Amino acid sequence: MSSDDSDSNGGTRRRFLGGTLGGAIAATLGGSAAAETGSAQEDLEFDCWRVHNLQYGTTVTFEDGSYISAADTSDGTLGSPGRVVTRVNDERGVTEVDQDCDPGELATTFTDSSVTVTASEEHALGTAEGAEVRLHYADGTVQEVLGTNETTGINPDHHRTALSTTYRGEGEHADKTIEAIEFDLMSYSTTTYLRNREVGEHLLGKRTPQERVVEVVGASEGAVEYEFTVDGPVEKLSLTDRIRAGDNDDVTDNGDGTWTVSGFTGYPGEGDAYVVNGEITSFTQTGGDGEYVVREHERRVVRSSLGDTDFVRIVGTEAGDVEYEFTVDGTVWKVTNIGTPLKADDNDDITDNGDGTWTVSGFTGNEGEGDTYVVAGDVTDFTRTGGNADFRITVDGREVDQTAFVDDY
């Protein structure tokens, strides 16, 4: 075994493996290793989340178990933003590398039951007509969600436009917890397998990956007493100090396969959480004069005393700043768990005006990046308060005219 402990690449320590050990690792990764590997691979350049000067038949592995395997590396570079490279296997042999570095933000992020992929995940995209996409679920099942000749929606014109695409399970796999996403690019003979490193957190305390978290959250000042019945088991859950089932919330097994929850909450943004395995067959507000919302799966609203709810998203379409403000006659909250490029951040503020309206003051910038909110009520005004970059507004995925946002909404 030969080694190169040079720290000329940001403190990187590289270790070359040859002979039997290298061959065993290479076989695991689906490649082959030469008997002598040291000098043959010293021209590899590691840049935290990517590696340069690769040759044909390469597999790049990341510290979280994700990998990219390519028959043709095209420009000699492979990588995945936000994931640290730890091993390279190509026709010259196997290289392991220890990197103490910051890989930046993830280009592919996971929630409980969805995956959002941005255009910076270039080694997962390829051309629009050449990708197959599969979801691997926590229960061991796999589902193809995009077949050959179907567009990824990210680069339909063969150019990466920095727009994101979100994949979810379909049919019997809907709402399952996702373990990983896999892309096969036919035109480049490349497989990209990206793991959901937060899968354990997303499972929370669920007994099966099909169970989901249901939250009953106050949307105004005032008490909310409620009762709902589920065709299946229910357990109390503590998510945060503000959203957790307490001693004043009761879960009852009815003995016929159904379970009933009787709960109490109040105050905006505070509420109760449950792990639910089955369909909610009824939901009733049994007391109090407060408003409420019922959320599940990535905090998607399924019931509300305020009426309809919508996902509102403000997204930059070019480099530059966008500052904005809008007011809602009802309530509004940030969506923070849908992927870094599109989640509302700390620089986005929501203020309770004390008269039944809430005001959002936000900031975004750069192509394909933006902020997402759930709005329960009516948007009464929208104003651009700063910046000069172009942007777009979508409501439930439908783009609306910026100059007539309030009327269209």
Image (cartoon, rainbow, N blue to C red):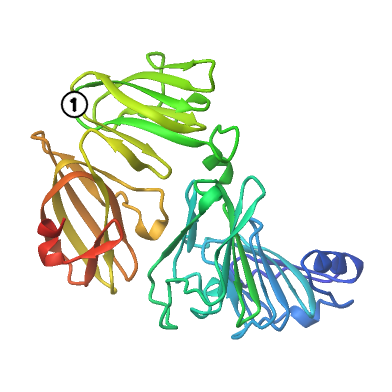
Measured as percent of width and height from the top left, residue 360 is found at 18, 49
168 with respect to 143 (left or right): left
**268 above or below 302?**
above
**What residue lies at 61% left-to-right and 85% top-to-bottom?**
74
Please tell me how many numbered marks the rendered image carries: 1
Residue tagged 1:
221
**182 above or below 319?**
above
Measured as percent of width and height from the top left, residue 117 is found at 47, 64
Dividing the picture into quadrants, the one containing residue 135 is bottom right
Measured as percent of width and height from the top left, residue 234 is found at 50, 25
Q: Camera-side residue: 252 or 10?
A: 252
**240 above or below 115?**
above
Q: Which amino acid does label 1 sit on?
A: Glu
**What residue lies at 26% left-to-right and 49% top-to-bottom?**
310
Measured as percent of width and height from the top left, residue 1 is found at 86, 69
32 with respect to 20 (left or right): left
* Quarter the C terminus occupies: bottom left
Q: Callout 1: helix, strand or loop? A: loop
Q: Camera-side residue: 146 or 326?
A: 146
**What residue lies at 38% left-to-right and 60% top-to-bottom?**
341
